[in-house]
Image: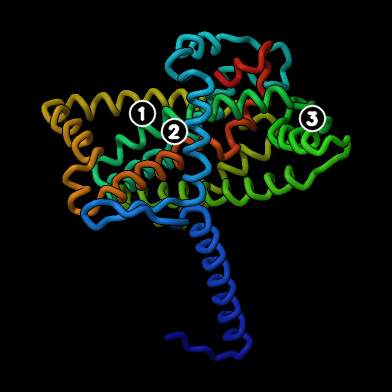
């Protein structure tokens, strides 16, 4: 129980608690609107499949783009590798490889690891299969949004380089209305939504880092948080520092990620067949469907897959618009 010796102190304390509760309620409301069950589909065994707004928007979009591009992620995979060799002519722009580095920094890391752990914890091993499916479908969406960012990018008169995501939203509205006016509302809404979204994702990732350091090295989360804020400020507030730091960190992270994965596979090599068998067995949910749990397997895999690969969220096109390519599709690739 809190003992207040000063009325003003009590008032400030309760005002702060009211503000905190208001923020929590706001975040919960937005989360339920985006990820909560918009409607449910009954399944055999007494279970149900809850369909959220984001799944309803992003998964059909990914399927549509995959069909329209004639299964581009598989068909043009060699072209994706060749596109990384593109050179840049302007110092203020990003190369194709740097674009990949920046987008990979958002897709692979603590958020990706936590997403998989959360999916498996909530939906079982079968959720991993649906994360794979979501990744393949999402890669078509990622290609389209990055290519559109290149097609509609404009030069940044203040900082140099290019910017593009809000502009192709603006151009779409302008073309749809058939009037040459500066309709900024859709682009502004995108910017506000992106700011809220990315602040939330950063908090999730920083919370995971702080928890990991506490569990592994008994470092208080406050100290870890302070260091993360200081490092982020140094990187973000310095001109061109973000790309330079990511040019170093992301390849190191990727190499460490790759070799740690190989090490874990080598140590548990005998269990690999049983792991894949369990993933496919639970993914198609014969036992889970009978027990009414197939919806949890499928939806947790899809939801965490969308969270991990960020296809359709609008973060990767920001980097794609800053790249310098002779053809827009190369940024998409």
On the picture, is 102 further left or further right than 251?
A: right
Determine the secondary structure under disc 1: helix
Q: Earlier in the sequence, mark 1 or mark 3?
A: 3
Where is residue 291 drawn, in percent x and y? Answer: 18, 53
Residue highlighted by disc 2: 108
On the picture, is 70 further left or further right than 174?
A: left
Picture residue at 79% right of the left edge, 33% below the top: 175
Quarter of the figure that contains the C terminus: top right
Where is residue 69 drawn, in percent x and y? Answer: 53, 20
Label at residue 219: none
Question: How far separated are the C-alphas under marks 2 and 3?
Answer: 28 Å
Question: How far separated are the C-alphas under marks 1 and 3?
Answer: 35 Å
Determine the secondary structure under disc 3: loop
Residue highlighted by disc 3: 156
Task: Choose between 273 and 158: the one closer to the eye.
Answer: 273
Residue highlighted by disc 1: 257
Q: Earlier in the sequence, mark 2 or mark 3?
A: 2
Whether the residues at callouts 2 and 1 have beta carbons within 8 Å, the answer is: yes
């Amino acid at each position: 129980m809190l003992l207040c010796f000063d009325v003003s102190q009590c008032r400030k304390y309760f005002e702060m608690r009211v503000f905190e509760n208001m923020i929590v309620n706001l975040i919960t409301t937005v989360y339920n609107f985006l990820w909560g069950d918009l409607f449910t589909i009954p399944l055999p065994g007494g279970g149900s499949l809850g369909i959220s707004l984001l799944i309803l928007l992003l998964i059909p979009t990914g399927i549509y783009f995959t069909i329209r591009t004639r299964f581009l992620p598989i068909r043009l995979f060699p072209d994706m590798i060749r596109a990384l060799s593109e050179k840049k002519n302007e110092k203020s722009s990003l190369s194709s490889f740097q674009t990949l580095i920046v987008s990979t920094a958002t897709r692979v890391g603590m958020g990706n690891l936590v997403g998989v752990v959360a999916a498996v914890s909530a939906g079982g091993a079968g959720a991993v299969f649906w994360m794979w499916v979501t990744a393949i479908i999402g890669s078509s969406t990622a290609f389209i949004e990055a290519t559109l960012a290149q097609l509609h990018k404009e030069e940044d008169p203040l900082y140099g380089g290019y910017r593009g995501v809000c502009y192709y939203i603006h151009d779409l509205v302008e073309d749809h209305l058939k009037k040459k006016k500066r309709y900024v509302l859709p682009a502004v809404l995108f910017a506000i939504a992106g700011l809220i979204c990315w602040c939330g994702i950063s908090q999730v990732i920083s919370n995971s880092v702080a928890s990991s350091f506490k569990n592994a090295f008994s470092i208080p989360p406050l100290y870890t948080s302070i260091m993360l804020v200081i490092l982020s400020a140094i990187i973000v507030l310095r001109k061109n520092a973000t790309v330079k730091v990511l040019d170093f960190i992301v390849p190191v992270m990727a190499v460490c990620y790759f070799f740690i994965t190989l090490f874990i596979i080598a140590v548990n090599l005998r269990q690999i067949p049983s792991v894949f068998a369990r993933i496919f067995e639970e993914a198609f949910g014969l036992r889970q469907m009978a027990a009414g749990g197939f919806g949890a397997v499928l939806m947790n895999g899809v939801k965490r897959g969308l969270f991990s690969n960020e296809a359709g969220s609008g973060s990767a096109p920001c980097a794609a618009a800053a790249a310098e390519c002779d053809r827009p599709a190369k940024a998409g690739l």
